[in-house]
Image (cartoon, grey):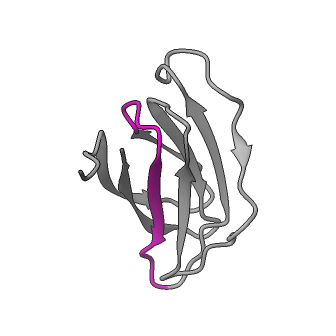
Amino acid sequence: MSAAFLSRYAVDVILPAATPVTVDVPVNGARDWLFILQNDGDTNDVTAMTVARYPLGTAEIGEDPVSATTGLPLAAGDALPIEGTSEPITTLRVVLTSTLGTTVRIAGGGW
């Protein structure tokens, strides 16, 4: 029996220069989830990222944002996984910054 996705999500995001952008990724209670952050820009890096997990939605109490250090800066064309195993949440809040600006895609799902 194959697992059914509880969450499938994809979005393209423009990161203006030196301006943090918040993306709320719906995980919908999936226990195991994987989202890929792809830098689709031509030249500029993603220079900072924080991640926060919300078990009941962003209007409720969640964990404090955690700064990602592994895989950053994320160069143009590179990708970085964001994943959880046995970690059911409703929302994953990702805050991204690019010093010089770029475009990213976040895609993935959970089961």
Residue displayed at 50% across by 33% down: 88
Identify the residue shown where x is 28% and y is 45%: 5
Residue 80 location in percent, x, y?
A: 55, 68
Q: Is residue 76 left or right of residue 7?
A: right
Query: Could you say where residue 11 lies in the image, as x and y percent from the top left?
Result: 32, 55
x and y percentages locating residue 92 in the rendered image = 50, 39
Taking the view exactly as shown, the residue that stands out farthest to the top is 60
Name the residue rendered at 30%, 50% in the picture: 9
Q: Is residue 16 above or below residue 102?
A: above
Query: Residue 55 or 40: which is nearer the viewer?
Result: 55
Residue 51, image quadrant: top right
Position of residue 38 relative to residue 42, above or below, is: above
Q: Looking at the rendering, in which quadrant would you find the C terminus?
A: top left
Q: Is residue 25 above or below residue 56?
A: below
Relative to 104, 53 lies left or right: right
Q: Which span is picked out in magenta?
A: 27-42
Residues 43 and 79: in front is 79
Q: Residue at x 67, y 66 (%)?
A: 47
Could you say which is closer to the camera, residue 48 or residue 109? 109
Q: Quadrant of residue 30?
A: top left
Q: Quadrant of residue 87?
A: top right
Instruction: Inspect the magenta stretch and tell me whether residue 13 lies in it.
Output: no
Magenta segment includes 30: yes
Q: Position of residue 49 (x, y in %)?
A: 64, 54
Q: How many numbered discs?
A: 0
